[in-house]
Image: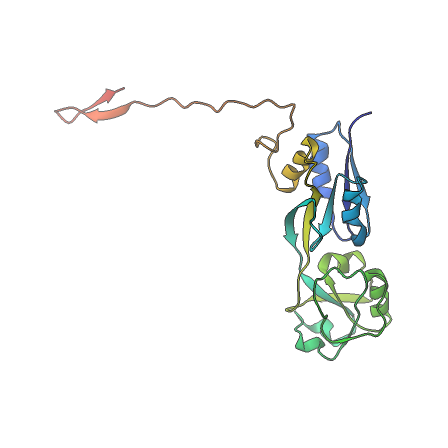
Amino acid sequence: MSPEFRLAYVPGVTPAKWARTWQERLPEVPLVLDLVPAADAVEAVRDARADAALVRLPIDRTDLHAIPLYTETTVVVVPKDHLLAAADEVTAEDVADALMLHPHDDTLDWPHPPGRLADHRPATTRDAVELVAAGVGLLAVPQSLARLYHRRDLTYRPVTFGPQSSVALTWLAAETSDLMEQFIGIVRGRTVNSTRGRPSSVPEQAPAVKKKRPTKVPNRRGRPRHRS
């Protein structure tokens, strides 16, 4: 059986560009992508259902390696006819009196969301977006999730407060395989010719040796002469 590399990823994260690079560099090794709930991503790695996972921090890093990749902008999702839809950005004061939704799968690591919290906590971010559309409240999320669950009657604006969501690559610390090294190289932007980013089938090449050019030294009459 041919080897394969299994990558789990959470909603909002888009591994497409890395998958294309993988296909170009290792066409003989299938990259299997598995979309999983944010709460299940780390366990997918620990249970060997995935070789690695793209997750949102923070996570329990026990027995895991994690490489932070990028940080997302936090936005507030509002109806298109809401007053905040006209703002370029939203401050904590702008939502101090607003009813805010706090889903159970919230990926923002804050002790208390801004505004007045709704008594009912939606099960998922998708459910919370539906409640925003129904006029029940507002929702603060990473921008990629606002895009993922976008509706025509909703919009979103960046906020100047609260935490931001960081996306990371994680895998078992005890199992950094050759394929894992290849994927690390891809997400870190290493070229195919870099030491760690090169497939094992590509041999190392000795660096080219530059020939030293002769230096011109003036003679006693002021005319240059060559010295090797």
Spot occupied by residue 12 in the image (x, y as percentages of width and height): 76, 53
Spot occupied by residue 216 in the image (x, y as percentages of width and height): 25, 25
Spot occupied by residue 48 in the image (x, y as percentages of width and height): 79, 39
- Compared with residue 164, is residue 91 higher up or lower down, i.e. above or below? below
**Viewer-nearest residue: 202 or 153:** 202
- Compared with residue 110, is residue 51 higher up or lower down, i.e. above or below? above
- Compared with residue 212, is residue 150 higher up or lower down, i.e. above or below? below
Which image quarter is the C terminus in? top left
Quadrant of res 6: top right
Quadrant of res 199: top right
**Viewer-nearest residue: 79 or 57:** 57
State the scheme by which the image is colored: rainbow
The residue that appears at 24% across and 21% down in the rendered structure is 226
**Viewer-nearest residue: 194 or 163:** 163
- Compared with residue 15, is residue 21 higher up or lower down, i.e. above or below? above
Query: Residue pushed farthest top?
Result: 228
Quadrant of res 17: top right
The residue that appears at 65% across and 39% down in the rendered structure is 184
Spot occupied by residue 143 in the image (x, y as percentages of width and height): 72, 59
Query: Residue pushed farthest left?
Result: 221
Query: Residue pushed farthest bottom?
Result: 97
